[in-house]
């Protein structure tokens, strides 16, 4: 087969990467967190070939800590970046057309990821967002990705205490958990600005952030003369719409113009409907990892998922298609991060964003009615 020298034209939308005027991304972003645990390198490269060379997806998202979950015996932080780097090395002619995003881990007292930033890998140590840690993490990611620059470098989660409902199932802020030694946001922004000046990253973004955090990053950037963050990667799906409540206002085009990159738009696969009625398909993520993403299988989440499936059935589409396309309908432009363990799943996920798939007003109204019955059931008590 002849080498592919450019990404083919696609019917997928291309939208600005937030306030970045020089980067446009497809409204589908290829997620990679299963690569190295549930997916082999060969399977990962097959997904990259299909998504990029056949469907025209130009956006890839990964992280220094991937793959996940880390409870798997095969887990080694950085493996996913290495898998992507090996593919990029075989497809160097496509690199300039791709938007490659990765993440630096936030605070973790004892982190094997942080130890893996050095060569050779060191012992577990604290993952932090101080200057030295960010510089070290970025250099390690560049080595693993086998590239000279990262298009979008994201802060995976804050250094300060923050109750992240998507991780913990709780959104209650407990003041006594604040840490006096948290790295100031200003120092993190300063480090990111220096990476931009050095040409190691083009833009930076946030992840698992609050409205306060977004505003503080913007304030620090403006005071330091550093570009503002262009994106935010928060949990967002039919079972978790917390972003809609207020973070969306700060990130609106009318305000800070920060692009939302929804992660887990299928609620860890629960919004495919495959776990309904107690089913646990062999090889499925929440069948293999019984303590992973279980918040999407609680009583409230299952009840809502059944109702959403009834709406999808009535609309004549799969629940997967409806759940993914719903992300596309939000008033804030999004590039939705999809993930798949099989090529068949990947095809269906990308198909959900084709222009021919349209959710009717009746379908959208029915979806909102379910949401009003129990908002964000994955974190509801």
Image (cartoon, rainbow, N blue to C red):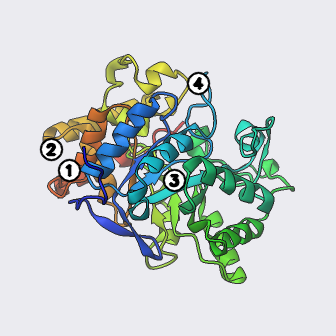
The quarter holding residue 21 reads: bottom left
Depth check, mark 4 against mark 2: the one in front is: 4
* Mark 3: secondary structure: loop
Q: Is residue 83 visible?
A: yes
Q: Which numbered circle lies on residue 363? A: 1
Mark 4 / mark 1, whichever is N-terminal = 4
Q: Earlier in the sequence, mark 3 or mark 1?
A: 3
Residue 358 x, y percent position in the rendering: 18, 55
Tell me the crowding category of disc 4: few under 14, some 14 to 19, or many 20 or more residues within 10 angstroms, Cα based: some
Which dot, 3 or 1, sits closer to the camera? 3
According to the image, label 3 marks what residue? 234
Q: How many angstroms separate mark 2 from mark 3 (CA)? A: 28 Å
Above or below for 76 versus 153: above
Q: Which residue is mark 2?
A: 315
CA separation in Å, label 4 and label 2: 41 Å
- Tell me if 355 is positioned left or right of 117 in this view: left
Q: Nearer the viewer, mark 4 or mark 1?
A: 4
Q: Residue furthest front?
A: 2
- In front: 316, or 298? 316
**Percent from the top left, x then y, of residue 158?**
68, 55
Residue at 75 percent of width and 45 percent of height: 118
Q: Which circle's residue, 1 or 2, is located before the other in the chain?
A: 2
Q: Which mark is residue 74?
A: 4
Q: CA distance from mark 3 to mark 1?
A: 24 Å
């Amino acid at each position: 087969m002849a080498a592919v020298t450019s990404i083919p034209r696609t019917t997928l939308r291309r939208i600005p990467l937030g306030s970045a005027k020089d980067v446009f991304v497809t409204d589908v972003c290829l997620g990679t967190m299963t690569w190295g645990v549930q997916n082999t390198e060969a399977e990962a490269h097959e997904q990259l070939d299909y998504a990029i060379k056949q469907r025209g997806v130009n956006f890839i998202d990964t992280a220094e800590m991937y793959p996940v979950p880390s409870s798997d015996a095969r887990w080694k932080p950085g493996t996913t970046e290495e898998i992507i780097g090996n593919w990029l090395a075989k497809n160097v002619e496509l690199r300039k057309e791709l938007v490659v995003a990765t993440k630096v881990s936030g605070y973790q007292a004892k982190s094997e990821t942080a130890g893996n930033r050095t060569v050779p890998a060191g012992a577990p140590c604290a993952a932090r967002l101080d200057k030295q840690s960010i510089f070290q993490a970025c250099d390690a990611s560049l080595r693993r990705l086998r590239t000279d620059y990262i298009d979008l470098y994201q802060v995976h989660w804050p250094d300060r205490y923050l109750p992240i409902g998507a991780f913990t199932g709780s959104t209650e802020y407990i003041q006594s958990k604040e840490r006096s030694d948290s790295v100031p946001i200003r120092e993190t922004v300063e480090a990111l600005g220096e990476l931009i000046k050095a040409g190691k990253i083009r833009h930076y973004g946030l992840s698992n952030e609050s409205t306060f955090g977004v505003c503080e990053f913007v304030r620090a950037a403006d005071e330091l003369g550093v570009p503002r963050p262009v994106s935010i990667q928060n949990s967002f799906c039919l079972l978790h719409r917390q972003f809609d409540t207020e973070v969306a206002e700060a990130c609106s085009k009318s305000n800070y113009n920060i692009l939302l990159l929804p992660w887990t738009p299928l609620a860890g696969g629960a919004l495919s409907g495959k776990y309904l009625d107690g089913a646990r398909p062999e090889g499925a993520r929440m069948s293999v990892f019984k303590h992973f993403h279980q918040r999407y299988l609680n009583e409230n989440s299952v009840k809502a998922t059944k109702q959403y499936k009834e709406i999808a059935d009535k609309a004549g589409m799969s629940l997967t298609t409806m759940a993914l396309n719903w992300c596309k309908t939000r008033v804030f432009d999004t590039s939705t991060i999809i993930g798949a363990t099989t090529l068949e799943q990947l095809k269906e996920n990308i198909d959900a964003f084709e222009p021919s798939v349209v959710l009717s007003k009746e379908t959208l109204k029915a979806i909102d009615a379910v949401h009003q019955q129990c908002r964000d059931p994955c974190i509801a008590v």
